[in-house]
Image (cartoon, rainbow, N blue to C red):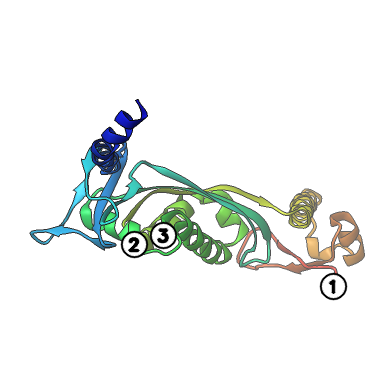
Amino acid sequence: MIEAIVGVLPLLLPIAGGVWGAVNSIRFVHEGERALLLRFEKVVRRQGKLVVKTPGFTMFIPRINRLAVIHVRTRTINLPSQVLTLKDASVLNVSAVILARVIDTADDLYHALFETSAGVNQTTNDMGLVILRRVISEKVYEDVVSNREAIDKELLDALQIEAKQWGLQIITFALSDCSPTIDTARLLQTARQSAERVTALVEASAILGTSPTALDPQLAAALVGTPLVLAIDSSSVGAQLEIGSSGQ
């Protein structure tokens, strides 16, 4: 029995090797993926065009050929929260989300696979943070609060220019949070309260038939809560009150 098995082994080994080689030469490209064929680590071109493998199975010679696979589904990239100082010295906690996908053309697949050493997700994350800091730091608090859509479009347009280089289409680049820090929130609240008091002071002066400038400066400061500089515009009906800091 043993001698029979030993005698058959030389016949079975080539068959087993052939089966093993055939199995290793089959690769599957899943739905939502694309692949480029490489031979000796060089992208294969046929008639000057890149060979793109679509979903399904493909066969190639192991150790000589391989597939470079990338998915073309929509990918979500969350930018971590950043503490950013605005043009008016307000400080905000800012985060954003990016939706993007690899463009499904041969050249764009090549750029997405080989033009970035860190990969498209990491590259998009890094460039997104750079653009986010640059754009937001040029705004004032009122812009961030009231013009979110315009800021989102500005972010998207700026990132799309860069992302074309690595075969990526930016679908959305939107702020997910832009809340003030605790210190900035306190300053904003104080400013709102002072503005409300100034408005009430001007209205009260009008009812009494007097001018805000006629009020004792110390009394006005006590009523409003901060030192005041009164700037009366002779061409306007009302008075403009500029709130100065306590150090001025």
- The reply to whether discs 2 and 1 touch (Cβ–Cβ < 8 Å) is no
Alpha carbon distance from label 1 to label 3? 42 Å
Identify the residue at image location x=60%, y=55%.
Answer: 142
Identify the residue at image location x=62%, y=57%.
Answer: 141
Q: In the visual, does 67 lie left or right of 200?
A: left
Q: Is residue 112 visible?
A: yes
Q: In the image, what residue type sits under mark 1?
A: Gly
- Where, quadrant-wise, is the N terminus in this rendering? top left
Residue lying at the far bottom in this picture: please name it: 248
Q: Sequence order check: which comes first, mark 1 or mark 3?
A: 3
Q: Secondary structure at mark 1?
A: loop
Residue 67 at what x, y percent from top left? 29, 50
90 or 52: which is nearer to us?
Answer: 52
Q: Secondary structure at mark 2?
A: helix
- Give the class, few, some or many, for how many residues have Cα within 10 Å of label 1's Cα (few <14, many ≥20): few
Residue 93 at what x, y percent from top left? 66, 54
In the drawing, what numbered circle is on residue 159? 3
- Where, quadrant-wise, is the C terminus in this rendering? bottom right
Identify the residue at image location x=26%, y=62%.
Answer: 40
- The reply to whether discs 3 and 2 touch (Cβ–Cβ < 8 Å) is no
Alpha carbon distance from label 3 to label 2? 19 Å
Q: Is residue 166 visible?
A: no
Q: In the visual, does 71 lie left or right of 88?
A: left
Residue placed under numbered mark 2 in the picture: 114
- Closest to the camera, between mark 2 and mark 1, is 2
- Give the class, few, some or many, for how many residues have Cα within 10 Å of label 2's Cα (few <14, many ≥20): some
In the drawing, what numbered circle is on residue 138? none
Residue placed under numbered mark 1 in the picture: 247
